[in-house]
Amino acid sequence: MNWLNSLAFRFWLAINSLVLTGVLLLSGIYYQRESANLENSLRNQGYAAAKTLNSAIGLYMLEGDYSHISPLTYSLLSEPNIAFVIVKDKGGITVDQKGETTIDKDLIIIEKESLEYFQEKVGTIEIALKTNSLVEQRKDLFSDTLLTALIISFISLLFSFIISKGMSAPIRKLITATKKLTVGERNVQVVEKGIIEIQELSIAFNKMTQTINSHEKILVSEINKATKDLSEKVAILEALANISSSVLEDKIQRFQVMKSTLESLKKHSKANHISLAFLGNKDELDIYELDLNGNLHQLELTATDSVIHAVIKNKEPIIHNNLSISFHSIYEEILINQGMHSLLILPIIANNKVIGTLNVASIIPNYFSKQSSDDLSVFINQIALAIDRVAAYESLQYSAYHDFLTNLPNYRLFKIRINEAIDELTNQPHSLAAVLFLDIDRFKAVNDTLGHATGDLLLIHVGEKLLSCISNRETVTRIGGDEFSILLPKLADPNHAVKIARKVMKKLEEPVIIKGYEITISVSIGIAYYPNDGLDADSLIKHADQAMYRVKEHGKKNYAIYTQPIDDNSIDQLSLESDLRKALEKNEIVVFYQPKINILTGSLAGLEALIRWNHPTKGLITPGYFIPQAEETGLIVPIGEFVLREATKQCVVWQSMGLPPIPISVNLSSRQLLQTNLVSSIEKILIETNINPNLLELEITESMSMDIDRSLEILDELKQLGVQISVDDFGTGYSSLSYLRRLPINRVKIDQSFIRDMTLNPSNQTLVSTIINMAHNLNLVVTAEGVETFEQARHLQGNNCDEIQGFYFSKPIPAEDFFKQYHDIMIEAEKWRLIQV
């Protein structure tokens, strides 16, 4: 059906559509006019008959003589087109009627005419005309019109077909010529005649064929010229593609990239020797070269090797086409020994800096030229990009698995190495591995007093010292903050881990000078063994960490081997939370009390209420193992409220038993301090227990009150109740003098971490003395926590510390034991009286 889209058909269709439309329109108009003329002619007959009758009967109608009317009206029926005649007087009464009035009304045209006599109306004449002849005449008219239209249309179709065929013939010839041109015929011409447009198109076509022939000859010539270099260009592209693809793998291997690069270049250059040289660490050149068997080797030369150094320095290629005459470097001597006579060295430049060289050698003398240099220069940028990608990948890999500050392996890499060590020991029964977890004692004090920059330098120093304590197959990592870990992957003797721990402690005890400060540190170390203490990295690290925390609890500056204590955190966390929720209901939460002794007056300064959990199966659990869980779950709020109520109630009970009023302090957790109803809750407890508010002291930590505005608001409301406020664990938080001065507090408690090493570490002595003097200047009472020896107590007394608290006087004890031991405690306190009360 392609002819439907042809130009001839469209021209033919356009002409005939126009002609047919005109014929139909004119025929319709003609038919309508003639039909109207026929009807008007019929009506004129009726009108003429009415006029004739009017003139004949007008006088009779005026005189009212109707007898003469009938013959006249009857005479009208002789006309073939008149159906009936009705005459009516001027009153509308029929006076005469002739003809059949029941004729089909559709075939009758009724004409009504007024009867007048000398312009006086005397009645009306109604004449009905038959339309039979009119219908027949119209049928004939329609047939004649239609036949005429069909004849004209046929003649139009015929003429338009002949004209369209004639007009499209030159176009078809052009189409045929174009098809020949398409299939490869070039000497194609068309006749340049026809209408003006066709003639111009033919001329343009002939010119086009001539232009194509001319351009095709030029193109063939250029193609022949280009194909001479095509194989070489393809070889270059293949080599470049190989170099590029070598760095697109997920895990880039430097050796594999070097090998792929050298193989591609050697194949392209057809050289006998090819290598890449890069500046390495410690003034060395790392040279990667392919041997005759295609294996990659790495050489190390000094970075000042003259021939390569000259290229790196000047950023210009060097050609030595006769190596045997003279040589100036070890590298050239190596090439001569391999039978090479010509050498080309090109600089590899990245970011306008020479990062290495491409070295090509041949056994043929005078083999290289400037053209050789230019040809190989094509690869320099691609090599530079490849090496840059390798370096970037290696840098990312290093950053992902190493600590940014100390450059030690990080926690991620440490876990990988632990698991690798475990995999190696899986099939070796009776083999051990050990993980040591280290924490720097009182590192926070160094950060807070000497600054984070000094702290960072100290961490770097610790990392270096730890590396000096282990062998190459063992790993030191920085877990984070001031925590480090050591992996001993294969132990014949478990005591080796203990020896390493002691070695580390001894090394780190040596004072170090940082920014003019002499700093002495110690570490707490926990040790866990594979497979006894864990079968995977997470378990071993966790248990070594727990062992380290036991060291912290028992005085720091020591090591401990992990054991499974009865109150260990191995209690399933979900079970722990469930048991903890029931502990209050079952009265398993108990309160112990630890005395605070005033070593200036030799009196009992008060008691601190300390929580314990009397677990039905685990025994007595210290708060360190369940308070974090209580904090996390929110259970610390009801537990804290219980301790407050129990301690204040006990204080009143002791008074009723004959003891003097004894101040009692209770710790507030951060969750409690944030409770909106804290003040009202404490006020309610004071009222319920009927205790003197001045006997209750609430202990907060420094970090809990960092939101100074919110803290001041709450603490001021508590002070209005009459209770005392103290800052616990002072020195471990973020206090500044101005910050401390704003708080409405009565006492500061020096953290035990400063007290324990105070008699051995001069820095701690200075810190403790400074805190006491600062607090006294602010009119605050000072309590020292964690006092365990006579020397510590004596030193604190010598520095005018007000109160001490610790195992030296008494461990935390139940309420009934305190009542029994009260007099013994008072006697012991009396021995420390320094001033008269």
Image (cartoon, grey):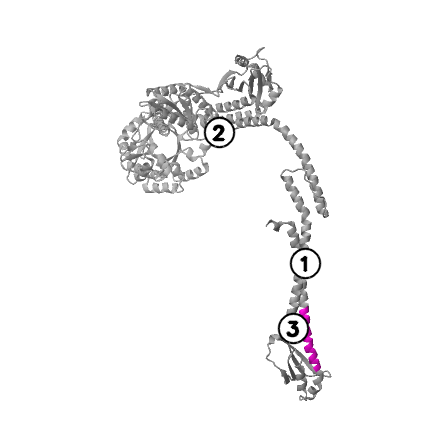
Residue 835 visible: no
Crowding at dot 3, Cα within 10 Å, few <14 / some 14-19 / many 20+, comes out as: some
The quarter holding residue 366 reads top right
Q: Quadrant of the C terminus?
A: top left
Callout 1 amino acid: Ile
Above or below — where is 420 with respect to 200?
A: above
Mark 2 lies on residue:
249
Q: Secondary structure at mark 3?
A: helix
- Asked if the magenta segment contains residue 38, the reply would be yes
Kindly report which numbered mark, 2 or 3, lies closer to the viewer in this rendering: 3
Front position in the image: 306 or 497: 306
Front position in the image: 819 or 426: 426
Callout 3 amino acid: Leu
Residue 554 visible: yes
Q: Secondary structure at mark 2?
A: loop
Mark 3 lies on residue:
134
Magenta range is: 34-52
Front position in the image: 717 or 37: 37
Work out which residue is located at the far top of the displayed protein and give it.
Answer: 325
What is the x, y in percent for residue 728?
A: 39, 32
Kindly report which numbered mark, 2 or 1, lies closer to the viewer in this rendering: 1
Mark 1 lies on residue:
155
Residue drawn at (30%, 40%), measured in percent from left and top? 582
